[in-house]
Amino acid sequence: MIDLWHLRGRAGVLAFAAAFTTALPASGEPAGAASPARLGQAAQAAQLTGSGQGAPPAGSGRPARPARPSVVLPTALAPEDVERAAPLASALDGLLSDTAQDLGLSVDLADRAASRSRPDEVELMERARSSDRLFIAPSLDLRGDEVELRLALASGGARSLRVRVERVARDDLAVRAAVMLRDLVAELDAGPAGPFPGHEAPCAERCRGRLATPARSLGKATLAANATLYGGLVGFSIQRSSGSDDPRLLYPLLAVGAGIGLGGAIIIAEEWDVGVADAWYLGSGTWWPTIAGHLIYQGRFAKHAEDPGQERWASGLIGGTAGITLAALGLSLGRMSEGGALMAQSGGGLGLLLGGLVEWAARGDVQRTPIAGMGYGAALGWLASAAAATQLDVTASEVLTVDVGALLGGLGAAALASPLVFDSPTEAQQRAWVGAAAGGFLLGAGVAWWVGRPAAAGARGARPSWNRFGLPMLGVIGESVVGSRRAPALGLGWQGAIP
């Protein structure tokens, strides 16, 4: 036992009372959970204590609060989505109730309505003001393959609703709903005053809306690999341009070039935040203009040069230097997305193919390799797609869809028109074959873009699907059982809903 009479004065009695109160468990809160306000106070107290500045002042305006009573209303659904989204809404109701308790709220299930109709916001604010409880009103709208989640918080004494709306995939609905509710409650507890003046806000305020902090320069490995390879190519090009075949000069130049490229990539990644898409975009500006420089010189100027081998490597270096400079200027406009980086890469490849087809059509001779046309096409295709990537917001799947559609359309049209180039075709027949291949190429790209384009908000749900009656299925349609032996039954079937 501690004898209070041996404690000196009122300060000793207050210290003992504070220690005894701190040792007691928090009443009215679930075990292992603390309210965001208390967590913020603990973080502030830890910062102040660790810095040797003592506890927060008594007049800081952040007293400890008991668990706030709250009501989680049933998830509201549109009348046409009640049957399809009822299981999703029920799961969301349980998730939000558990998350609210984890955030230190006391969930009241007695005042919970059974209707899933969207509540009137004015009435919701009046209920919150009259009962002094926190009302959480979620609602769901089906948007094709995605779900639009809306969370509204109405608290007593507030003159406005706190609302957050996000459109997420169905698989990410649980995670995003928990994060949205956490952010809304944190904003509500922070109040208009915000964190303590003169101190850094806790992570609940600084890292709001983030599940994890991304690492810096995720594209360091990609940038280092491209820079090392290109540095070695620069050393090899310098050796070939000098007209020397001495290996005693070649290997040191290769090592020096690769080392300079690797060191430069490491310095750049440490100085700037280089993402994976940024590194691949810069790599596209390295390789495609270099390839274009080689092809253009070989197809256009090699026959007029005294030593075409030397000047061809110098032309490749000029193209690569120009490409790196333009790609760096493009990155200075902002961060590059994965779809933009892939667009720059595919632009060089598709431009190379189209340039070759254009030269074939101009010459009327498909037996000669269109080297110059491929070079011009690669350069112009990369330049156009790299410029468009800095302005357009595309995804990698959309770019891949267009690429696959273009290749399949071009190959299909070339196969259908192949009788034109049998035996000894004339120039007109060869040009017709090239025109058919180029038309199929462009038509396939256009159809792929049209099919894979993102639907407008609500358009997919408003229009009937083109495959609403089902699709043919070729494969296993049943199973044959004879005694203990089983064998799959192969055939053609129809899979889908019966109209």
Image: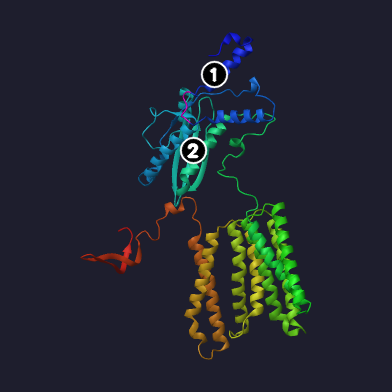
Camera-near label (1 vs 2) is 1
Q: Main secondary structure of the magenta part?
A: loop
Q: Position of residue 481 (x, y in %)?
A: 23, 65
Q: Which residue is mark 2?
A: 151
Q: Nearer the viewer, residue 116 or 204?
A: 204
Question: Residue, x 49% and y 26% (percent of image)?
Answer: 68
Is 30 placed left or right of 487 in the picture? right
Q: Is residue 356 left or right of residue 163?
A: right
Which residue is tagged 1? 20
Q: Amino acid at mark 1?
A: Phe
Residue type, label 2: Leu
Q: Is residue 28 magenta?
A: yes
Residue at 74 percent of width and 63 percent of height = 260
The image quarter containing residue 38 is top right
**Residue sitting at the far bottom:** 424
Depth check, front residue: 177 or 104:
104
The first of marks 1 and 2 along the sequence is 1
Quarter of the figure with residue 362: bottom right
Residue 87 seen in render:
yes
Residue stretch rendered in magenta on the structure: 27-31
**Residue 391 shows in the view:** no
Where does residue 331 sit, x and y in percent of width and height?
68, 57
Which residue is at the front of the view, 264 or 124?
A: 264
| Label 2 secondary element | strand
Does the magenta segment cover residue 52?
A: no
Residue contact between numbered discs 1 and 2, judged by CB atoms under 8 Å: no
The furthest residue to the front? 1
Count up the numbered dots. Answer: 2
Quadrant in which residue 390 is drawn: bottom right
Q: Quadrant of the C terminus?
A: bottom left
Alpha-carbon distance for marks 1 and 2?
40 Å
